[in-house]
Each structure stands twice: as structure tokens, then as C-alpha cells.
Amino acid sequence: MIEKSAGRLKLATVAWRKVPFDSWWASTKTTLGSASAIESATGTGSSSPFPAVNFSGCTADTWASVQSSGAPSAREAHTSVWTGTEMIVWGGYNGTSNLDTNTGARYTPATDSWTATSTTGAPAVRDYHTATWSGSKMVVWGGFDGVQDVNTGSRYDPTADSWVATATTTGVPTSRDSHTAVWSGTSVVVWGGEDDAAVAQNTGGRYDPVGNVWSATTTTSAADARWLHTAVWNGTKMMVWGGYDGSSDLNTGGSYDPSGDAWAPISTTGAPEAREDHAAVWTDALSEMDVWGGQNNAVVQLNSGGRYNASTNVWTSMSTLGAPTGRRLAEVVWTGSEMIPWGGWNSVDLDSGGRYCSGTCASVPPAGTSTITLSKQGGGELVSWTPVPPAVAFDLVRGALNQLRSSGGDFTSATQACLGNDQVATSYLDAVEPVGGDGFWYLVRGVSCGGAGTYNESAGSQVGSRDSEINASPNSCP
């Protein structure tokens, strides 16, 4: 109000118009260091417009299940990104329907729940594409649409649940699938893959979403051409590992520095076995690349992995205790303390996953003894036992009572079978019946990442060590 009288008011309005983001960012980004960039690296858990999720209850080197109710339909060759609070799963292929999809969902670990993503304005169906998180949007690019490879893409905003197509400009990489892409803080770095002729690529490009332009990556000293590999961003470099070169799987890799447009090799000493279609994340403060799952040259789906320290160029093995079923084509995100793989394929498409707490194991071998109970169920005997902290899995062995008696209590000769090796469940249905006049005995021990526990009784009349005798049996659990 600038003037007032008995019958009149005189008002004025003032407006401060917002500067468009692209205009502001174009003038501001050169003044910021990489650590303060608005948009953060995909899956690194660094700066994000979303609040961080607290996983203080996470136990190192262990797994936990992921809710399947409300999850997207079973699929493989899909993508996922971590937003700071959610994992966004999108696209992929369903082997049962033999169709690609452009559907997806957002998974929130804090509530263990799923929410579907909009299909309005979404990219065309595809698989073997890539997705990166820019700090506010998921950027989808490339892949196979069921007929041919594409070099198109789109950006998804989870806040608005909406899509906007990305431009195809001069310098965009050739159409491809099974490539990788990372967010460097200012650009999407695309590399590798195969073309429609199934020829492996060692080329790539850097996409600047602000300038909407592409520039090629160097091939000098680049990692060998490959597809079905992984790539992670460690804050300054893209690290490529594993994959398939057209004739065999690889356990080699390389790190790419976009600021210098240069490559350096990754050590193979102690590396996981060669594989393709695996998953990998960068673990932030641990300064490690965690690799898991995939398929080897024998077409065996793996539930093993390894942790690579970029500072020391050294690999460390990863526990498989409580790990999900081995699989290829799983998608994975890093939450800041856990690696969450989901989906993939092992004989059928999977809608399951797990949560791996990365870091050095701090557990000791379980020291307690489980209490075993038996009950008739269906066509067999249900063997159940009580958990023993800090066990995350169990070994169950079975033997014949007559043999144990006649041998004077020798568990080496009396052990008949390992029924459960590193089994997460605390029960087992044994459908085998003993021969007439005989019976079975069962023993169980807990296992943690610190090692195997004991079959021995903590009290009672036991003589000698069951552990040493059972371990000496060819039928023991490894």
C-alpha cells in the first residue's frame, strides 16, 4: 500500500522472476568444484535433494530380504538408480511374455514398500539400456527396443512422476545395447556395449544435459571392447569391470578419467572369476567397488562377488552367507551403507533381492549350540532348530544311528549327508526314510562371516570333538 484516504487505497505489486535453471547453471557451474556440484554421481550416496536414509541397524557383511508385494512384474535387463531415499527400477524384458516393458516402480527401504512409476510420456519399451541419477532426475539412454538398438533417451522426475525426452544431437554415440553409463557430476559418460551386428565396442561419449551436447571418449589405452560389463563412478573416475568380449567372459577392467580423457588398468590379482551380466556399486567412504552375481563361461549363475579398493588396487573376497540365489542381469543400488540387488534371471525371471552390508566382517564364529526338534510333515521329517547369534546361516548334517553305535561314536564314518550348507532357514524337510530297524541323527552348526560354529554340545556327556570327526567325513558340509 502506497497511499490511503477515506474512500480509496492505492496499491503496488513487485515481482522477482526466477532465473531459468539452465541459464543459472550455465553461469554458475564453472565456479563450483566437483565436490560441490548440484548433481551428484549415480548411486554414490553423495549430495542429493532427498534426505539420507539411516540404516544404523545394518550388520556388516550380512543380507536381508526385500518386500515383493507391490513390486514391478518379474523382469531382466532392466535398470535401477538410487535417489537418496528410493531405488527406481525401470524397463527390461520378461522371458515369459517375451516382451519388453516401459513400466517401473520406486522402492523405499525405510518402509520396505513399492510405488509404480508413470508410463505417460515414458520412453519406448526397451531392455539392456542404461539409467543414471543426476541428483534430481533419472536419465535413461540407449538399449534394444525388441527390433533394433536405439540411441534415444529420456529424463524421469520422481517428484512430479513425469518424463521429458532427451535430445539426440551431433556427437551422440552410435546405437547400442548392453553398454554402461555413469554420472560424473556434470555429464553422463556412456561406454562400451554391442551394436546390432553383435560387435563389441570400446567407444563412448560424454553427454552434457545443460548444453545438450555430446563429446567422444578416447580409445587410447582404453579397456578392451566388451558388453554386459559394469561401470561405477568413484568421484573422479569411471571404473569398468568384467563383461563379455564376443568370445569369452572377462575379469579385467579399467578406470577412465573424463577430465583428462585418459584410461588406466585395474588389477586382476585376487579379482572375482570372469563373468558377465553382473552388478557393481561404489561404496563411498569405504572407497571400494563392490561386484556381485552374474554368469560365468559355463553359463552358471553366480552369487559370489568381490570388493575392489581403488586406492590400493587390491581385491577382497565377499561373503556368500545368506546371499540371494545366484543370478544374472540383477540390478543394484548403493544406499550409503548397503548394496541392494533385485530381479534378474536364474532359470526363470526373479522378483526377489537382498541387502548386502559392505565392509570388513566384525563377527566371530557362533559359539552356541542349537536345540533341534523333529516333527512329521507331509512325506518326511521336519527338522527345526533354534538360531544361534551371530549366525546368519546354518550347516545341517545327517547320519545313521546304527553306524554311530557300531563305530563306537565315530561321526566320521556315521555322517551320511550334508542336508543344508550355509542355509538361511532354520528348518529342513527331510523326505528320506531310514532303513528298517535304523534311525537318523541330526546335528546343526551356525555360520557367520567370521567362520563356522560348532556341532559340539556346550554341556552333557559328549566325549571328543564332533567337529573334527564330521569335518573329516567326505559327506560333511564344506
Image (cartoon, rainbow, N blue to C red):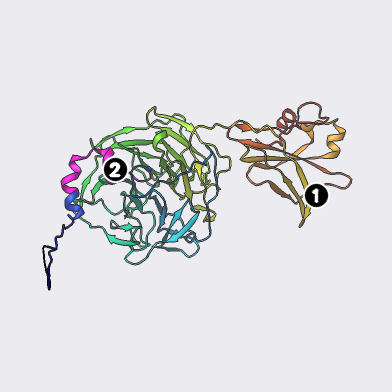
Q: Is residue 149 visible?
A: no
Q: Is residue 30 magenta?
A: yes
Instruction: Residue type at mark 2: give it.
Output: Ser
Q: Residue 13, which numbered label?
A: none
Q: Name the side, left or right, on which 227 lies relative to 400.
A: left
Residue carrying label 2: 184
Q: Find out whether residue 363 is within the magenta segment.
A: no
Q: Residues within 10 Å of mark 2 (few under 14, many from 20)?
A: many
* Residue 166 placement (x, y as % from top left): 25, 57
Tell me: 134 left or right of 90. Answer: left
Residue 254 % position (x, y): 34, 36
At a point 47% along the width and 30% down the height, the residue shown is: 270
Query: Residue placed at 45% from the left, 35% from the top?
Result: 307
Please tell me whether mark 1 sits on a helix, a strand or a loop: loop
Q: Quadrant of residue 91?
A: bottom left
- Which residue does the numbered mark 1 point to in the structure image? 433
The front one of 171 and 44 is 44
Part of the protein shown in magenta = 25-43
Residue 34 x %, y % = 26, 38
